[in-house]
Image: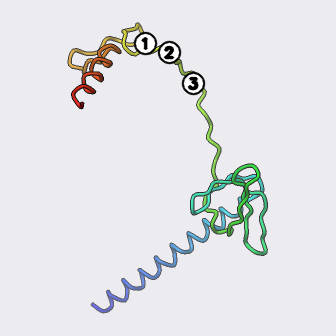
Amino acid sequence: MTILLFVMLGLFIFMMFRRNKKTQQQQTQLQSKFAPGVEVMTSFGLYGRIVEIDEEENKVLLELSPGNTATVHRQAVTKIVEPVVAAEEETVVPDDASSLTTETADRPAPAADAPRTETPDETLRRLNDEGKKDS
C-alpha cells in the first residue's frame, strides 16, 4: 500500500513539472514573436501595439491609442491579437420597416402555428393601452 502511495506522489510531482515546462515553452514561443508593430493583449485586458521592447529590464512599451502609451512587464503580455478578416458578404438593409411586416417572394408566409407579428399600428395601440393601465 505504501508503494502505491509513493508511486502516486511521484506521478503527481512528474505531472506538475511537466505542466510547468509546457507553460514556459509556450511563453517563450509567444515572446519570440514580439516585435514593434504587433497587436497584443495584456493579462489584465489592455489591448495595444508594441512600440518598443527593452530586453535588459524586461519591459514593453505599448501604444494603447494614438499618443497614449503604457509600459508593462514583458510577462504581462499574454496574447498576440490576430487581425480579424471581415467576411465579404453584402447585407441588404431595407429603407423602411415595411419589409418586416409584409410577405415577400424571398420570405414565405409564416406557418399557421407560428406566432403572429404585430403591425406597427397594433404595437402603438398596445403600448398606449399599457401606459393607461399603469396610471
Q: Is residue 74 left or right of residue 109?
A: right
Residue 40 lies in quadrant = bottom right
Q: Which label is found at residue 89?
A: 3
Give the CA distance from mark 1 to mark 2. Answer: 7 Å
Mark 3 closeness class: few <14, some 14–19, many ≥20 residues within 10 Å:
few
Q: Which mark is residue 21?
A: none
User: Looking at the image, which residue is at 33% across and 13% down?
Assistant: 121
Q: Which residue is pictured at 27% across the width and 27% down the height?
A: 131
Q: Could you say which quadrant of the image residue 125 lies in?
A: top left
Residue 61: horizontal and vertical position, in percent?
74, 62
Q: Amino acid at mark 1?
A: Ser
- The residue that disc 1 covers is 99
Q: Mark 3 near mark 1, Cβ–Cβ under 8 Å?
A: no
Labelled pair 1, 2 in contact (Cβ < 8 Å): yes
The amino acid sitting under disc 3 is: Glu
Q: How many marks?
A: 3
Q: 107 and 123: which one is in front?
A: 123
Secondary structure of the residue carrying numbered label 1 = helix
Q: Nearer the viewer, residue 97 or 72?
A: 97
In the rendered structure, which disc, 1 or 2, sits on the residue that comes first in sequence?
2
| Cα distance in 3D space between marks 3 and 1 | 20 Å
Residue with the mark numbered 2: 94
Q: Residues within 10 Å of mark 1 (few under 14, many from 20)?
A: few
Q: Give percent across and percent down for residue 105.
A: 41, 7
* Residue occupying the point 73% across, 69% down: 59
Residue 15 spot, x, y in % from top left: 46, 76
Mark 3 or 1, closer to the camera? 1
Q: Is residue 113 left or right of residue 119?
A: left
Which quadrant of the figure contains the N terminus? bottom left
How are the residues colored?
rainbow
Give the SS element for disc 3.
loop
